[in-house]
Image (spheres, grey):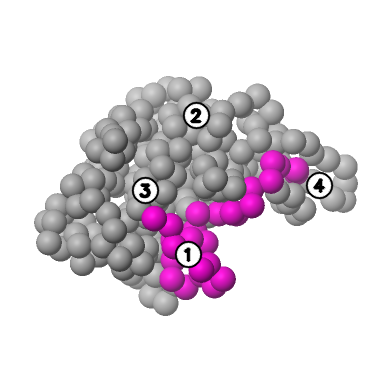
Amino acid sequence: MLFWFKPMLSNVEAEVNFLGYMAHPNIIKLLGYCMDEPERLLVYEYMPNKSLDRFLFTDTPNIAVPLSWRTRLLIMIGVARGLTYLHSANVTYRDVKSANILLDGDFNAKLADFGHARRGPETEGTHVSTCVVGTYGYAAPEYVQTGRLNIKSDVYGFGVVMLESITGQRAIDRNNQHQNLVECVTQIKSDKRKLKKIMDPRLEDKYPLKGTSECFELALRCVVHNPKERPSSEQVLQSLEQIHGLYK
């Protein structure tokens, strides 16, 4: 996939610096770059299915076939593997969202756009960012309110992506900016009868109730207000793999 754009130089440098030394199946591969003015160029591996958000939402045109539940689950596992790899290297991604999750021809997920990524702090440490970045609806509340950042901020964003994958609804309703997906779904908690009502109707009830219920409960744990109560990305990955094991 080829991107041509004129971003801030600092973002381009950050992208090159991070992707230049990272190698993981669920991290986008940077093939080359050009830093010459006035145009700067980043060249990535080709991702024919583009981004996850194109497949999740009913207001996205030109998507004929919605993703099956199993495919969505495998995508979530791939993202969790990518985040676990980043966090093990003491890197905070800072912009987990469905638009930054690219899909190859087999729908394998790869994290992209590392312009906001940051090294540190240590696993349980926190540092204060002078400039809050990220995307409204995905950014963790403690980060938005105080600028305090750690890897659990990424877990919050991933929890939102999980909820989008389950419901087929955007983090923030485009027609109502006050309609927040996290606030809406946390009201139903783990009531399986209500869960069925918010499942993406395009799944046509073709999903295991036990697996989707456990996935929903995991997503809710990821978006709790207190970051210390959120699971680590590694714990999220382990839980998702256990849920996937129900299919075997």
The reply to whether dot 3 and dot 1 touch (C-beta < 8 Å) is no
Sequence-first disc among 3 and 2: 3
Find disc 4 in the rendering and name its residue: 40
Mark toward the viewer: 2 or 4: 2
Secondary-structure class at tag 3: helix
Find disc 2 in the rendering and name its residue: 86
Sequence-first disc among 2 and 4: 4
Mark toward the viewer: 2 or 1: 1
81 vs 150, nearest the viewer: 81
Q: CA distance from mark 2 to mark 4?
A: 26 Å
Find disc 1 in the rendering and name its residue: 65
Secondary-structure class at tag 2: helix
The reply to whether dot 2 and dot 4 touch (C-beta < 8 Å) is no
Range drawn in magenta: 42-68
Q: Residue at x 79, y 46 (%)?
A: 41
Question: In the picture, residue 151 is in which quadrant?
Answer: top left
Sequence-first disc among 2 and 1: 1
Question: In the picture, residue 173 is in which quadrant?
Answer: bottom left
The image position of residue 111, as x and y in percent, is 54, 41
- Residue 181: tell me if it is visible: no
